[in-house]
Image: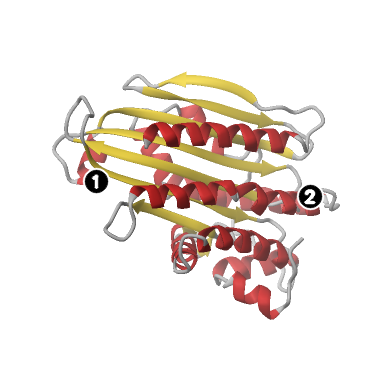
Amino acid sequence: MKERFTDYIRNLQDEICDRLEEFEQNARFRHDNWDREGGGGGHSRVIEKGDIFEKGGVNTSTVYGELPELIRSRFEVDQGWFWAGGLSLVIHPRSPMVPTVHANYRYFELYDDAGMSEVRDCWFGGGADLTPYYLWDEDAVHFHRVLKAACDKHGGELYPRFKKECDEYFYNEHRSEGRGVGGLFFDYLRPTEERASENWYALTTEVGDAFLESYLPIVKRRKEESYTDRQRYFQEIRRGRYVEFNLIHDRGTLFGLKTEGRTESILMSLPPRVRWDYDFQVPEGSEEAHLIERLKNPVDWIVYGKELEIEDP
């Protein structure tokens, strides 16, 4: 399974980077290999200073070795060894009219022996979520529809479950607001009598394959929208909330740092320009207030889209 998943994330990394580069005249992804001292390594690809994408990273990694103490206590084991493979991406567009997007697809194996010959536990995780700065409701509807369609191929109960988990996970408790308009989040998808690892692999890769369809039509619709310096300023304020979540709450960031992952690759998720103003407020009834209201009150975007008869792009 880990060899298959490694091939999958590497191929998906190629496809995503190729498609994103089609939007740029000159900017290209920088390729960067790295090794982890405890075992394994990764391949980072970062794009910067593009006309459309101000900064973005699409990274893959396969790391293994002895479990660090923090992870051992989390899994309640005295000793253990692990293998973890995944693709993680964050794209920060230049225009505040184009939303930031994040996605992650991962697989984990846990062993009792240093030779890692017998799998004691294994699971899949992942998801994708959208973080707009100026919100067109139809963009959020489209994003959720595509992800729901991918989930529905593997069970109608999955999208509502993963959507709820996303709303709960990507939430800045100290701000009482979501990081964005949600998407999917799932973790610890272990084999059971009902679903084998093969089934969870099929789901995870289905969702991964749906990423470009969920995001690129939004980029195409919004990349030519005009914006003002004031709107760019608001984008940087909201990026501050993104940074707060990644550094305070994100489990992936913590896992990478605590397993001696490559710091530059882990923190590539942070935007290039950001600000924190004291007690920043938005005018009532403004476009900015519309976004904040959505972030404080999660929306069932599938039902909302049907009620307003919103069509796909």
Q: Quadrant of the N terminus?
A: top left
Label 1, residues with CA under 10 Å away: few <14, some 14-19, many ≥20:
few
- Residue depicted at x 59% and y 34%: 57
Helix or strand or loop: what does disc 1 sit on? helix
Q: Sort mark 2 into few (<14), some (14-19) or many (20+) by Cα contacts within 10 Å.
A: few
Q: Residue furthest bottom?
A: 307
Q: Which mark is residue 237?
A: none
* SS assignment at label 2: helix
Residue drawn where x is 55% and y is 72% of the image = 297
> At 61% from the left edge and 40% from the top edge, which residue is drawn?
271
Callouts 1 and 2 close, C-beta under 8 Å? no
Compare residues 10 and 290 and report the one nearer the observer.
10
Depicted 217 relative to depicted 8: above or below: below
Q: Residue furthest left?
A: 78
Please state which of residues 274 and 64 is positioned toward the viewer in this rendering.
64
Q: Residue 274, image x and y in percent?
A: 63, 43
Task: Say which quadrant the C terminus sits in.
Answer: bottom right
Labels 1 and 2: the sequence-earlier one: 1
Give the residue type that dot 2 points to: Lys
Real-space Cα distance between discs 1 and 2?
42 Å
According to the picture, the residue beneath numbered tag 2 turns out to be 220
Q: Position of residue 231 (x, y in %)?
A: 77, 54
* Left or right: 259 as drawn, with respect to 277: left
Q: Nearer the viewer, mark 1 or mark 2?
A: 2
Toward which corner of the image does residue 106 lie, by quadrant? Answer: top left
Relative side of 125 to 38, left or right? right
Horizontal and vertical percent position of residue 6: 45, 32
Q: Is residue 235 above or below residue 178?
A: above
**In this orientation, does residue 290 appear?**
yes
Circle on res. 74: 1
